[in-house]
Image (cartoon, grey):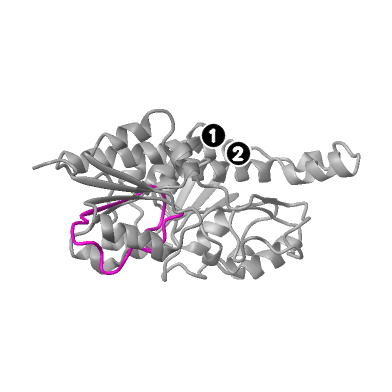
Amino acid sequence: MPGISSLLAILTPFEQEKFFPGDLYDQIRALAPDFALIDPTDRSAAEVNAEIARRNPEVVLACWQTQALPQPLPDRLRYVCYVTGSVRRLVTRQQIEAGLLVSNWANIISRTVAECALFHTLACLRRDRHWQLTIHHEQGWRDDWEKVGSLFERRVGVHGYGSVAREFLKLIAPFDCSVSVFAPDFDAKAAAATGAKPAASLESLFAYNDVIVELAPLIDATRGTVTEKHFRLIRPSGVFVNVARAAITDEDALLRVAKEGHIQVGLDVFVQEPMPVESGWRGLRNVSLTPHIAGPTLDRYVDAGRHALRNLRHYAAGEPLDMPVTPAGYDAAT
């Protein structure tokens, strides 16, 4: 019969408060007659896993501070509802193939990542970093103001066509841009409503557009594929933004090109995080930086919490999960 016999939540107080504010947590508690909460703060993985094995729940609700689940999994466990991103450290691909149901925040966070891409795009075009240094530290004013640009009617190239790229296209729609996309899975027919067209190659994407936004997934096929050759194809005053993964690019090559000062760069991701104090990225006038915060802002953690609650209800009703983790999705996760 539908329903959840036992639900074990593994959440820190912070995760509980931010992902399930208001009555969301009480709604989750009400889904199972046998409900328990484990706070993994200051507890080892062995301690938590011993408790999981002892309780042998049907459903586990997990979050960032949850470590790898016990192996083998408890024999009653049917569904792992992970509130946040990659589930690679929790379960194996083989367990999903064998029928374990798994969900995460999927594309619920795509709009906030796309928003960050738009932020960096506008910051680069408007030369925000230059003005921060000029006004705050150099007591200057409008020197080089004529180099400032607008996003309206620009040529924008997007590398990748996942959920973040699609959300980004929605956000820039009011700017009446000419958009081209390079991605193996780009469906030109389905994207016709956005006005986006396929780029013939990655090289043409970089050479043709005023703004290039990196939104491809980090998989074997994309790792290290954006090289110095591509960066040098960017036209003077052009913009390159990366809110995906740094390892898609040759980061050292990008830094070399950025230091020449001819292009604007916006980055939220780096090969080494946190960024070393001596990093060459620090202090450049033409580079907009954020510390890997393109994902959900704290006020939007609730989006992931609501998505988890919806999926728990789907499971309890015997209905298909919304955007479950598939073996292919597991492979694409980082």
Q: Residues within 10 Å of mark 2 (few under 14, many from 20)?
A: many
**The residue stretch that appears in magenta:** 65-88
Residue type highlighted by circle 2 = Leu
Q: Horizontal and vertical percent for residue 301?
A: 46, 39
Is 48 contained in the magenta span? no
What residue sits 60% from the left and 41% below the top? 119
Where, quadrant-wise, is the C terminus in this rendering? bottom left
**Which mark sits nearer the N-terminus, 2 or 1?**
2
Residue 73 in the magenta stretch? The answer is yes
Dot 2 and dot 1 residues touching (CB under 8 Å): yes
Residue at the spot 44% in from the left edge and 44% down from the top edge: 110
Rendering coords of residue 175 (x, y %): 54, 34
Q: Quadrant of residue 263?
A: bottom right
Where does label 2 land, which residue?
A: 151
Distance (Cα) linking label 2 and label 1: 6 Å
Q: Is residue 143 visible?
A: no
Image point 42% across, 63% down: which residue?
45
Q: Secondary structure at mark 2?
A: loop
Q: Main secondary structure of the magenta part?
A: loop
Q: Image quadrant for the N terminus?
A: top left
Residue 261 placement, left or right of 166: right
Q: Is residue 14 visible?
A: yes
Disc 1 residue type?
A: Phe
Q: Nearer the viewer, residue 175 or 170?
A: 170
At a point 87% along the width and 44% down the height, the residue shown is 137
Secondary structure type for disc 1:
helix
> Seen from this angle, which residue lies furthest left?
1
Q: Residue furthest top?
A: 22
Q: Which residue does the numbered mark 1 point to in the structure image?
A: 175
